[in-house]
């Protein structure tokens, strides 16, 4: 069995890869590692029960998986604060704000409705490092009970399903409805603009008309509320989740509806979130897409001008556009590069004490205000810069030229075989040699899907298309 955790938690098709039993057992294992339940807690003679906050996006499968996670936590002696349907960054923030030992979010982010996932946050709302995820996997493996076996027969008296002998010393966890805490997160977002330079008015987005696409996901209530509270005239789309339509032809993975709505309503800008709202992409008044690199460039320049960009450095991933790197060099801003995944961004930012980082996909981390990517926070600050500057969004993002970049996802392939293929290695080397200094090639297995991602960047779009197609053919031939 391969590693259970991927780039962003444990993810798979609900009911097939991610079952109720796995969710329950995984929650109990996480409780043992992140909250020190069981023998570890007893050794510390700790009397107070640990606390976890739990949220989910509106996928239909989230209901039974949430019930399983809550059962696993409460059975392991963890008190649960149930947030209901909330964005992932709300769980991260409230984990810290409520003093919880850890947080759990059930979401598959930008994936389609049949998928789901479980993400964990450590104390303070931090994403877990690989070694802690490995500890959870090891504990999970040690506590799994073979079908038909009795826990006591196997000596597993520490298993959460092993009966009265395993009643936690401080009692079973209690479950509390904490949906009202979502307003605390909303207040946090709005207050994040205070103290910035120039001073913001009470309604910093007054005068802006904004279309927001909530992807029929977790932000369907909070995103419009936040923008209206900040003074914007808001038109909302993708805000009618039915459990099955999350990310379906809308949101940050499908910007056509948003672009059309912005033009139709003569809006100043459009904002798109993904299913769990840890991403933010945008479109300008003409309906042209503004990606994460462009958003990051605008925020970096704003922070540098205000003297608040730590060490005049921004953190990004290997997927960032060449145009972003050139724009930052022109502005005197250094760029630190990480692997894909916002937890790698966060780790590099914490290590270097940087305050801003992000991905082209729209994961933007503003470490002064959040420990993880937060799409609502990003949208608020991007629009606040637009309103304060009294310049169109298109003009703001023109600070960087977006070089042609071709992205191809090859699904249902053996990622291990592709990664180790000498044929593919040779093909990548040939493409890199042809591009020289005028482009880049990146072929990598996805950490969240059974797919291999191909990226070719070049000054000439036809050349980028040709090289990406050739590499895609090589990958498919290995399937």
Image: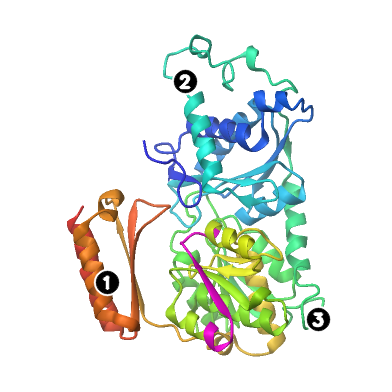
Q: Residue at x 49, y 36 (%)?
A: 137
Residue 412 lies left or right of residue 62; in this view the side is: left
> Residue 172: x, y in percent?
70, 24
Q: Earlier in the sequence, mark 3 or mark 1?
A: 3
Q: Quadrant of the N terminus?
A: top left
The colouring scheme, among rainbow, by chain, secondary structure or one colour, is rainbow
Give the structural element (helix, strand or loop) at label 3.
loop
Picture coordinates of residue 279, whole percent (x, y): 55, 64
Mark 2 → mark 1, Cα distance in angstroms: 46 Å
Contact, CB < 8 Å: mark 2 with mark 3? no
Q: Nearer the viewer, residue 392 or 324?
A: 324
Mark found first going from the N terminus, 2 or 1: 2
The residue at which mark 1 appears reads as: 468
Name the residue tied to disc 2.
Answer: 145
Residue 168 inside the magenta-drawn segment: no
User: Which is more N-terminal, label 3 or label 2?
Assistant: 2
Disc 1 is placed on an element classified as helix
Say which residue label 3 marks.
199
| Residue 239 visible within the image | no
Residue 28: x and y in percent read 58, 30
Residue 435's quadrant in the figure? bottom left
Q: Find residue 76 and name its label.
A: none
Q: Which residues are magenta?
A: 328-342
Residue at the top extreme, as displayed: 153
> In the shown orientation, is residue 287 left or right of residue 13?
right
Instruction: Name the foreground residue: 380 vs 124.
Output: 124
Mark 3 neighbour class, 10 Å CA radius: few under 14, some 14 to 19, many 20 or more? few
């Amino acid at each position: 069995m391969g590693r259970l955790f991927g780039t962003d938690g444990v993810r798979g098709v609900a009911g097939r890869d991610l079952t109720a039993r796995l969710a329950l057992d995984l929650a109990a294992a996480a409780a043992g590692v992140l909250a020190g339940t069981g023998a570890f807690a007893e050794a510390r003679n700790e009397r107070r029960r640990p606390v976890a906050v739990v949220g989910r996006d509106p996928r239909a499968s989230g209901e039974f998986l949430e019930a399983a996670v809550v059962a696993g936590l409460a059975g392991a002696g963890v008190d649960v604060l149930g947030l209901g349907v909330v964005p992932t960054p709300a769980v991260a923030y409230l984990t810290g704000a409520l003093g919880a030992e850890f947080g759990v979010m059930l979401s598959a982010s930008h994936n389609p409705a049949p998928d789901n996932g479980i993400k964990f946050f450590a104390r303070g709302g931090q994403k877990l490092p690989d070694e802690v995820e490995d500890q959870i996997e090891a504990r999970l493996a040690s506590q799994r009970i073979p079908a038909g076996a009795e826990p006591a027969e196997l000596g597993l008296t520490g298993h959460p399903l092993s009966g009265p002998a395993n009643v936690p010393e401080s009692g079973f966890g209690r479950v509390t409805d904490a949906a009202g805490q979502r307003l605390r997160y909303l207040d946090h977002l709005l207050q994040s603009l205070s103290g910035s330079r120039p001073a913001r008015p009470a309604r910093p987005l007054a005068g802006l008309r904004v279309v927001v696409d909530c992807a029929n996901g977790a932000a369907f209530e909070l995103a419009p509320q936040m923008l209206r509270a900040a003074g914007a005239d808001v038109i909302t789309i993708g805000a009618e989740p039915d459990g099955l339509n999350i990310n379906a032809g809308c949101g940050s993975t499908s910007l056509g509806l948003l672009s059309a709505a912005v033009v139709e309503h003569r809006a100043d800008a459009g904002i798109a979130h993904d299913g769990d709202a840890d991403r933010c992409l945008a479109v300008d008044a003409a309906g042209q897409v503004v990606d994460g690199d462009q958003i990051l460039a605008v925020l970096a320049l704003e922070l540098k001008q205000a003297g608040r960009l730590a060490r005049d450095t921004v953190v990004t991933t290997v997927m960032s556009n060449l145009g972003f790197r050139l724009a930052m060099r022109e502005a005197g801003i250094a760029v630190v590069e990480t692997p894909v995944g916002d937890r790698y961004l966060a780790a590099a930012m914490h290590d270097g004490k940087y305050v801003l980082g992000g991905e082209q996909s729209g994961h933007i981390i503003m470490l002064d205000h959040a420990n993880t990517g937060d799409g609502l926070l990003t949208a608020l600050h991007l629009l606040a810069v637009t309103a304060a500057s009294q310049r169109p969004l298109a003009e703001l993002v023109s600070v960087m030229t977006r070089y042609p970049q071709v992205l191809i996802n090859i699904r249902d392939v053996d990622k291990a075989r592709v990664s180790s293929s000498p044929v593919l290695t040779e093909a990548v080397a040939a493409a890199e040699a042809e591009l020289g200094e005028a482009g880049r090639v990146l072929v990598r297995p996805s950490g969240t899907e059974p797919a291999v991602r191909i990226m070719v960047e070049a000054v000439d779009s036809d050349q980028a298309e040709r090289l990406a197609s050739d590499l895609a053919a090589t990958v498919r031939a290995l399937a």
